[in-house]
Image (cartoon, helix red, strand yellow):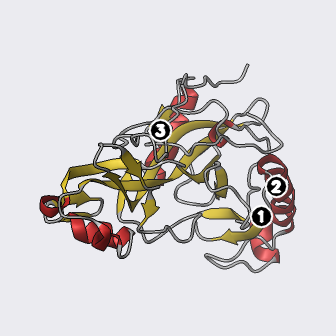
Amino acid sequence: MLKFKKVIATSLSVFLVISSFQLKVFAKDENNINTLPEDSLSYIQTSEESIPFVTKNDIITYSLEENADTLSVPSREIWSKNTKSILEDTYSQKVSDILEDDDFITFEFEISNDLDPTEEHIMKVEYIKPESTLATENYDTKITYTWGWKKNFFEYDSKSGKWSSLKNLGISVVGASSIPVANFLASAYSGVTSTFKSDQQVQVDSLYKAYYLNETCHVKESLLGYWLPYCFTGCRKDFMAGSYTTYDSYGQPFMNPPKEITVGKPSSNPTNYDRIKKSSHFDDINWMTKRAIELYKMDGLAHNEVIGYPDTPFEGNQKP
């Protein structure tokens, strides 16, 4: 009997209607949407071996010094090759590099240009080395990192009125203070403000796109050897976007498709975000491992403080 109980969760779908004959519909500001899709990558249970210990004979034979690369030790070299194969088969992505530092042996994955960024993807898997200060006696742990984007835009602020008075109003934008509507709209649609008549009715929407990076701490189950997920943390990175709707003399709305002002680069782990929100323990690997082991030992429900998830579930060869 596996010592693991799944978190009961539901999926959240958000739809964006873009039409020149319909009023626009945006999702409101996204806060604490932490429902875990049942087919998330986070649920996948793999069965690769734990990192082999480096023995005293290994240290003597290979003249290992403190902080030395231990992947040259045959037992770890074989383990890394076998683990690489299992991970590639599981996540349907190629491993691009295997790295080592004082605490981790990390498998990084290739990010091809043809990946759908709104689908959930694996970024890397970090195995805590048994000789690391992060290691907990008698328990093996690893951290998986998954990423993806929301397809739709979230509304941050909205202003409407006759253009003559609207253009000088302040509108709130993510990652910055309020700025004049005319300046904001010009940053998204160059030159468009010169086409508006002073008495024309206009609505301007401050939006953002959301990227997610989520961490899952797995504990290796001792009976059947599965790595079970017990602790989830995450962060959301927001990128400024905008949209506007004009109205003719009959009140008929004509909406323009949303446009990204800040384009996240690189798509797999953007660093040029306008705003970032992290869950309480996102940067605390030590806390995550201790919490995951605690829940594993008591056969408890997984701890989940993830902020959100991309739209499309994982569509690889393996299913949770």
Marks 1 and 3, how far apart in space? 28 Å
Identity of the residue drawn at 47% across and 55% down: 257
In this picture, residue 154 sits left or right of residue 129: left
- Earlier in the chain: of badge 2 and badge 1, it is 2
Identity of the residue drawn at 76% across and 50% down: 91
Residue that protrudes farthest toward the top in the picture: 1
Q: Foreground mark, 1 or 3? A: 1
Identity of the residue drawn at 68% across and 71% down: 99
Q: Mark 3 sits on what residue? A: 291
- Earlier in the chain: of badge 3 and badge 2, it is 2
Say which of 55 and 20 sits in front.
20
Q: Mark 2 sits on what residue? A: 88
Q: Secondary structure at mark 3?
A: helix
Q: Disc 3 marks which amino acid? A: Arg
Say which of 23 and 271 sits in front.
23
Instruction: Please say whether residue 283 is visible from this viewpoint.
Output: no
Q: Do residues under tags 2 and 1 come within 8 Å of each other at their CB atoms?
A: yes
* Coordinates of residue 292 in the picture (x, y in percent): 53, 38
In which quarter of the view is residue 268 placed? bottom right
Q: Disc 1 marks which amino acid? A: Val
